[in-house]
């Protein structure tokens, strides 16, 4: 029996065929047969990386998949799977192709539990609870209890992963792993539509509609154009194709004097190197910002860009002057053309620009790129020692970042503040800007480093998010990663306070309608947003990292020197900042943000205590 080809062999071989070379997870007897099958090879092709918990394992697999095209996480039934639901949901939302392998009880245990009322370990008594939980957040979910059907179920789900670039779920009964089966037949491939043969009319319509919007003059004026480079360029490997498009579009820039540039947004930051001559910055694509970029007559052409809340400031930016090609379709002004491949669309757009006459291209003169995108200046001089703030931190951090670094910023203030960092390398920045699960960055750093062993990962994480997934430092230690973790210690959930009531962050607080008993609340941070105080340097000692506490700009300068002087070491750097400091534009006297308490309740704040 031990020499027979089994279901465990089948899944392993299919995963290797798709290029998987590392799995993350937490050991459990229900998945042991698969792990044993991998380890039994003289030279295993898949490395098994045990993680501190399923949360950090899921985040690591997600980040790994973003770079490698496939990631995998193994868990144990229910107790492990329930924890992995959050990371897998994020992978689904942000199109990270992760395989979740959930080891399940045997068929015998299932039947005994159902018919005799015996409750086994890790079970709720309902056999379908796990798969029902994952079906809404995966491209395919298979419950495998029969070795005859298993190969077909495995192939079907992995085809869905290739097609949709989203997670898939396998729930495999423990007594099925070692059952013999036939070896795979043929190679798996994406099931994407054959756009070249079936949808030529739709593709032509999308291109024609796009070019009509771009070339149409408004009141005799030329239309300024800017491209918005989206996350799908990275997910589908189309970055070079986008650069080709830029080259064609700007072939006559020496004549027009006004090249057509591009921007990215928080989710797509660094999909194209920010050293590119046509890059105009990482921008929140709100309606006011769009008007600043291309004026009220201009055109935004989003290539693989998603209108998620963080990227568009929760605004509806669709108009007769926007083109958004993503999610397998093109929305060009008011017209939506479905089933259009992004790659084929880009090919058509390139050809359309090539066919334009030189005079037409002159008329397309877009925005003037003489203005320099806003970035933190590298090696900015700091003559006066000051207490640390978010802005000072990022100005200083810019001195560290080179093409040899990948920055991962956690949700909240760290992600907001990081947008003005200049990232010179393609895919040199990772931020979970759509799902926004705090703590993602620490686990993601594990996967990023495994996928990019020659790079050094720099993590910027809030203290609240650090509380969620600090166990990931154990994973960094066990894999001997030289990751640098900057913990922004302000003692509060800053972004949560800001969303509800930003008054504590305003230089000039807003006066609200108030009641005498609670008038002091409007300018203070609410108690439920305050965090317990941790000794962060003790984590450095525990997990074998160099610990540095930074309170001033001089401390930060010294910390960066030490980090650069020890390129193979891990660092945990505590950045001490005031509780009422916030990054970038948020920390201004003319704050446009309006808190939820200000909007929803005219009698804010309520009587009584929080």
Image (cartoon, rainbow, N blue to C red):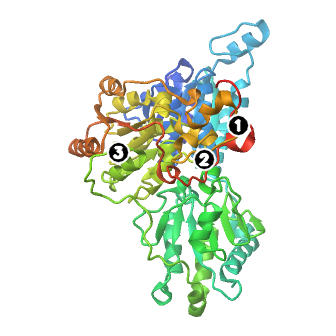
Vertical order, 478 against 407 (above or below): above
Give coordinates of residue 340: x percent, y percent.
Answer: 70, 65
Q: Is residue 381 left or right of residue 512?
A: left
Q: Is mark 3 on a helix, strand or loop?
A: loop
Q: Distance between the residues labelled 1 and 2?
A: 30 Å
Which residue occupies the foreground of this view, 497 or 524?
A: 524
Crowding at mark 2 (Cα within 10 Å: few <14, some 14-19, many 20+): some
Whether residue 183 is visible, yes or no, is: no
Q: Farthest residue in the left direction?
A: 565
Vertical order, 9 against 567 (above or below): above
Q: Name the residue under label 2.
A: 434
Vertical order, 489 against 394 (above or below): above
Which residue occupies the foreground of this view, 472 or 125?
A: 472
**Number of the front mark, 1 or 2:** 1
Earlier sequence position, callout 2 versus callout 3: 2
Give coordinates of residue 221: x percent, y percent.
Answer: 65, 86
Which residue occupies the foreground of this view, 547 or 231?
A: 547
Q: Mark 1 points at which residue?
A: 604
Q: Quadrant of residue 50?
A: top left
Q: Mark 3 points at which residue?
A: 453
Earlier sequence position, callout 1 versus callout 2: 2
Crowding at mark 1 (Cα within 10 Å: few <14, some 14-19, many 20+): some
Give coordinates of residue 467: x percent, y percent.
Answer: 48, 28
């Amino acid at each position: 029996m031990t020499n027979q080809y089994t279901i465990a062999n089948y899944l392993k071989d299919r995963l290797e065929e798709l290029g998987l070379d590392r799995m993350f997870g937490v050991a459990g007897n229900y998945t042991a047969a698969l792990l044993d099958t991998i380890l039994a090879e003289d030279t295993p092709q898949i490395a098994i990386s045990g993680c501190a918990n399923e949360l950090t394992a899921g985040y690591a697999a997600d980040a790994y998949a973003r770079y490698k095209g496939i990631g995998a996480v193994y868990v144990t039934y229910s107790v492990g799977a329930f924890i992995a639901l959050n990371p897998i949901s994020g992978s689904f939302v942000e199109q990270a192709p992760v395989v979740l392998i959930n080891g399940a009880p045997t068929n015998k245990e299932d039947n005994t539990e159902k018919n005799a009322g015996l409750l086994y370990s890790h079970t709720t008594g309902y056999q379908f609870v796990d798969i029902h939980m994952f079906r809404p957040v995966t491209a395919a979910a298979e419950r495998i209890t029969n070795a005859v059907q298993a190969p077909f179920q495995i192939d079907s789900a992995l085809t869905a992963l290739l097609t949709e670039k989203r997670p898939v779920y396998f729930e495999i009964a423990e007594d099925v792993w070692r059952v013999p089966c036939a070896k795979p037949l043929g190679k798996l491939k994406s099931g994407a539509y054959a756009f070249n043969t079936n949808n030529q009319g739709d593709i032509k319509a999308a291109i024609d509609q796009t070019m009509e919007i771009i070339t149409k003059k408004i009141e005799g004026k030329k239309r300024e154009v800017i491209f918005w480079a989206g996350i799908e360029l990275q997910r589908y490997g189309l970055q070079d194709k986008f650069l080709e498009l830029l080259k064609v579009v700007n072939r006559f820039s020496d004549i027009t004097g006004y090249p057509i540039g591009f921007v990215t947004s928080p989710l797509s930051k660094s999909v194209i190197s920010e050293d590119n001559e046509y890059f105009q910055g990482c921008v929140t694509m709100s309606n006011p910002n769009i008007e600043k970029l291309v004026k009220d007559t201009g055109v935004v052409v989003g290539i693989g860009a998603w209108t998620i809340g963080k990227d568009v400031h929760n605004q509806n930016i669709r108009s007769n002057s926007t083109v958004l090609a993503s999610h397998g379709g093109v929305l060009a002004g008011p017209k939506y053309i479905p089933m259009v491949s992004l790659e084929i669309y880009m090919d058509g757009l390139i050809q359309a620009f090539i066919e334009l006459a030189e005079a037409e291209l002159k008329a397309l003169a877009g925005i003037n790129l003489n203005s320099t995108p806003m970035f933190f200046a590298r090696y900015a001089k700091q003559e006066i020692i000051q207490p640390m703030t978010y802005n000072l931190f990022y100005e200083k951090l810019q001195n560290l970042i080179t093409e040899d670094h990948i920055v991962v910023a956690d949700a909240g203030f760290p992600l907001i503040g990081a947008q003005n960092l200049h990232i010179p390398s393609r895919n040199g920045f990772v931020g979970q800007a759509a799902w926004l699960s705090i703590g993602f960055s620490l686990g993601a750093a594990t996967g990023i480093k495994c996928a990019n062993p020659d790079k050094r990962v720099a993590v910027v994480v809030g203290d609240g998010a650090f509380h969620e997934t600090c166990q990931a430092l154990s994973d960094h230690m066990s894999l001997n990663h030289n990751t640098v973790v900057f913990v922004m210690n302000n003692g509060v959930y800053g972004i949560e306070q800001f969303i509800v009531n930003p008054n504590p962050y305003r230089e000039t607080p807003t006066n609200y309608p108030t009641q005498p008993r609670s008038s002091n609340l409007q300018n203070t941070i609410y108690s439920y947003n305050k965090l317990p105080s941790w000794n962060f340097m003790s984590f450095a000692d525990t997990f074998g990292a160099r610990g540095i506490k930074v309170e001033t700009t001089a401390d930060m300068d010294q910390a960066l020197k030490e980090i650069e002087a020890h390129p193979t070491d891990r660092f945990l750097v505590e950045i001490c900042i005031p509780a009422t400091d916030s990054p970038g534009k948020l920390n201004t006297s003319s704050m446009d943000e309006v808190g939820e308490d200000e909007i929803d309740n005219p009698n804010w704040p309520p009587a009584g205590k929080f």
